[in-house]
Amino acid sequence: MLTNAILLSMKNMEAVQDFSHISVLLYETVDVLDVTPGKTYFDGTFGGGGHSRLILERGGNVRASDMDSDAIENAKVSEVFRPYFESGQLTLTKSNFADFLETSDDTFDGMLFDLGVSSHQLDTTERGFSFRRDARLDMRMDQTTPLSAYEIINEWDYDELKRIFYEYGEERYAPRIARRIVETRERRAIETTSQLVELLNTHPKRVFQALRIAVQDELGSIERMLKTAPDCLKSGGVIAVISFHSLEDRLVKHAFRGDARLSVITKHPILPQNEELNENTRSGSAKLRTARKVGE
Ligand SMILES: C[S@@+](CC[C@H](N)C(=O)[O-])C[C@H]1O[C@@H](n2cnc3c(N)ncnc32)[C@H](O)[C@@H]1O
């Protein structure tokens, strides 16, 4: 008979195998936070917990959030994180980081945001994030929210579709794609990623990026976070943001430059080195920007 301990460890193995995410710019990001044992750091995008884990190993306390319940559940059954939860060195909340910061009275010695999608989300077929996998149109990071890619594709009007493909996908064929979607759905609902890919007639990457950003209102959350984060940062503390496309990076760059509470550390963003690029193709577009909270 399988004992509870064996069952739990099998569950952990599944969880760890399921949640393969190679952290991007891991040392570059955590080094700049200059982790001091006993001080407290906020990780707004816990994901597979790679960045948090390094902070914990260096003795920092971590307060973390992620809007995806898979990330939370996975951490809760992981042997790696169990001792940190038990000792209180780690707490993890299911929340959008912007909501978390807007409602928190805490201040932190450093903050990090590793934006975008996790490998777990991309690799889990039924989440519908990947144009390479056939699934129902979804793309919700928080699976409890009502808006998914399905509603956008089947209900938003031509102008709205065109706008998100232009603005969030920087897709030059936005009008043609929006028209084709509207015409197709008059005949039948567009239900799956494959049906969408089939009608696009162009590379799906930009359209999928646009949909993901729209489903989550990702740029809205980043803007709200950039406004609030400096208030939650102690003087001398560092905020580090890893972005994955120009729309995100532009928001971070301008917010850091234009915020009197911050002094920019990275005049130019830090990019992954060749070794990381070779090991992790996902790191290709990553840019790390950091800034320090100036004294009051
Ligand atoms: C790139 S992964 C983070 C990976 C993590 N740093 C690691 O090393 O494993 C991004 C994570 O952030 C989460 N996320 C994205 N936008 C978010 C938001 N506005 N609020 C909370 N979590 C968010 C996603 O659900 C995903 O799990």
Image: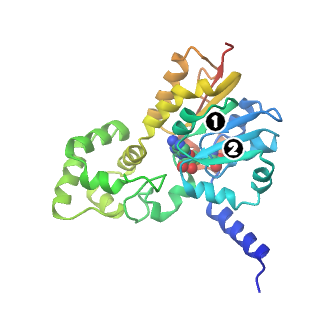
Is residue 265 depicted above or below 16 in this figure?
A: above
Instruction: Report the front residue among 279 and 23.
Output: 23
- Left or right: where 34 falls relative to 282: right
Q: Quadrant of residue 247?
A: top left
Amino acid under label 1? Answer: Leu
Q: Is residue 172 visible?
A: yes
Q: Is mark 1 within 8 Å of ligand 1?
A: yes
Residue 90 pos. (x, y %): 73, 46
* Disc 1 target residue: 112
Q: Is mark 2 within 8 Å of ligand 1?
A: yes
Q: Residue at x 78, y 38 (%)?
A: 60
Q: Residue at x 66, y 44 (%)?
A: 276
Q: Secondary structure at mark 2?
A: helix
Residue 82 pos. (x, y %): 76, 56
The answer to whether the residues at label 2 and label 1 have Cβ atoms under 8 Å apart is yes
Q: Secondary structure at mark 1?
A: strand
The Cα atoms of the two marked residues, 2 and 1, are separated by 9 Å
* Disc 2 target residue: 51
Instruction: Report the front residue among 170 and 210.
Output: 210
Query: How many C-alpha atoms fall within 10 Å of the one at disc 2: few (<14), some, or many (≥20)?
Result: many
Query: How many C-alpha atoms fall within 10 Å of the one at disc 1: few (<14), some, or many (≥20)?
Result: many
